[in-house]
Image: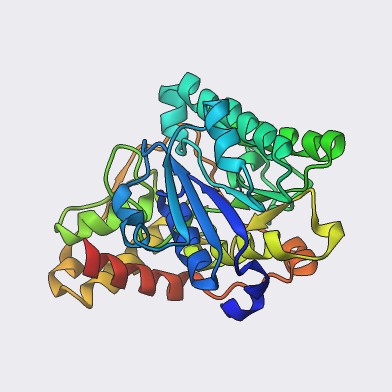
């Protein structure tokens, strides 16, 4: 990704909510390289201070320890800001099934607070993390933005409601919004710990400990795993595009290819075995299917290519190679 394409962001004030999280901290890092003035807002519920520790000494970076469920905090964070990259949310389908109330409070009430604050503070553009879970029980492949099914989890409901609210704020208040439907993002800084860890970092940690990872189901479910650099590119394109027809839309943020969970786990084991040959001997196990899981996900990225000039820099294998190297050096 050529950062000189985004020179227009130099000296612009950008708020990244969830800035201490996996995706948020990567966005902060890239924006600082471009020369933007970055504020990260995070309550550190799922984000980590160590993700942003290197930026704290930079004069163009500031951190607000705050919660998007508090409207006053959102108003303060949005004051004087040009663009918002809203990443703050409680992720995970299982988490939302176990505790739908908290997921709703953060993902819907918190999202609405941020929209209101962005509107009140006259933010130029509001780019937010939507989700491929919005496609729900739709079996059509590849997934195209205008055709969705019924949600399969409370989490999916919250992310769909975000899209509806953003659309209304665009039409009613003139707030320019862009939704990015993330498809299974992975890469550096993604947390391997905790009950709701994403599959790739979780499997990485287990393989490194010579423990067998457990696939939910028989491993034939497939995903459009998307490397973090592709997601960063989409966020930058969404806040810099001069194409007015690209605004107040949602876009698949993906590679446009898929791999089964079984094949992913085998590739991961193979990649890690370059660093430790004993990992090659670790067996992969299977468990029951997980409630709320979508069987297959594959994105059409035509809309993003056409309206935002999106060009993914990383296919799954090249992204996995970089992610594994980062985990080996940092875990």
- Residue drawn where x is 35% and y is 57% of the image: 56
Of the pair 256 and 305, the residue shown nearer to us: 305
Q: Quadrant where the C terminus lies?
A: bottom left
The x, y position of residue 182, in whole percent, is 58, 52
Horizontal relation, residue 271 to residue 320: left or right: left
- Residue drawn where x is 37% and y is 44% of the image: 47
Give the total number of marks visible in the rendering: 0
The x, y position of residue 164, in whole percent, is 74, 34
The x, y position of residue 15, in whole percent, is 56, 50
Q: Is residue 239 above or below residue 132?
A: below
Which image quarter: residue 175? Answer: top right
Q: Quadrant where the N terminus lies?
A: bottom right
Q: Is residue 157 visible?
A: no
- Residue drawn where x is 56% and y is 28% of the image: 72
Q: How is the image coloured?
A: rainbow
Which image quarter: residue 239? Answer: bottom right
Q: Residue furthest top?
A: 101
Of the pair 133 and 217, the residue shown nearer to us: 133
- Residue drawn where x is 59% and y is 61% of the image: 254
Q: Is residue 95 above or below residue 129?
A: above
Horizontal relation, residue 211 to residue 242: left or right: left
Q: Is residue 207 visible?
A: yes
The x, y position of residue 16, in whole percent, is 53, 50
Horizontal relation, residue 318 to residue 3: left or right: left
């Amino acid at each position: 990704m050529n950062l000189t394409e985004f020179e227009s962001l130099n000296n612009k004030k950008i708020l990244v909510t969830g800035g201490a999280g996996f995706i948020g901290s990567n966005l902060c890092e890239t924006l600082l390289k471009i020369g933007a003035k970055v504020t990260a807002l995070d309550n550190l519920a799922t984000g980590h201070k160590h993700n942003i520790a290197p930026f704290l000494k930079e004069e163009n970076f500031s951190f607000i320890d705050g919660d998007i469920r508090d409207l006053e905090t959102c108003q303060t964070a949005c004051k004087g800001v040009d663009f918002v990259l809203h990443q703050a949310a409680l992720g995970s389908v299982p988490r939302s099934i176990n505790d739908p109330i908290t997921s709703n409070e953060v993902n819907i009430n918190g999202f609405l607070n941020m929209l209101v604050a962005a509107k009140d503070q006259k933010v130029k553009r509001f780019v937010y993390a939507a989700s491929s879970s919005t496609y729900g029980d739709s079996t059509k492949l590849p997934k195209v933005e205008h055709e969705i099914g019924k949600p399969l989890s409370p989490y999916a409901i919250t992310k769909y409601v975000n899209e509806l609210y953003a659309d209304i704020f665009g039409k009613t208040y003139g707030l320019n919004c862009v939704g990015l439907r993330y498809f299974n993002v992975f890469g550096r800084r993604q947390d391997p710990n905790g009950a709701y860890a994403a599959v790739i970092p979780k499997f990485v940690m287990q393989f490194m400990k010579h423990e067998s990872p457990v696939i939910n189901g028989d491993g034939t479910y497939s995903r459009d795993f998307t490397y973090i650099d592709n997601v960063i590119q989409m966020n930058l394109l969404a806040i810099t595009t001069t194409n007015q027809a690209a605004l107040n839309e949602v876009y698949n943020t993906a590679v446009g290819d898929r791999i089964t969970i079984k094949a992913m786990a085998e590739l991961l084991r193979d990649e890690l075995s370059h660093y430790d040959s004993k990992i090659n001997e670790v067996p992969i196990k299977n468990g029951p299917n997980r409630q709320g899981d979508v069987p297959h996900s594959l994105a059409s990225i035509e809309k993003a290519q056409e309206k935002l000039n999106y060009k993914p820099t990383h296919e799954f294998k090249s992204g996995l190679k970089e992610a594994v190297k980062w985990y080996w050096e940092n875990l």
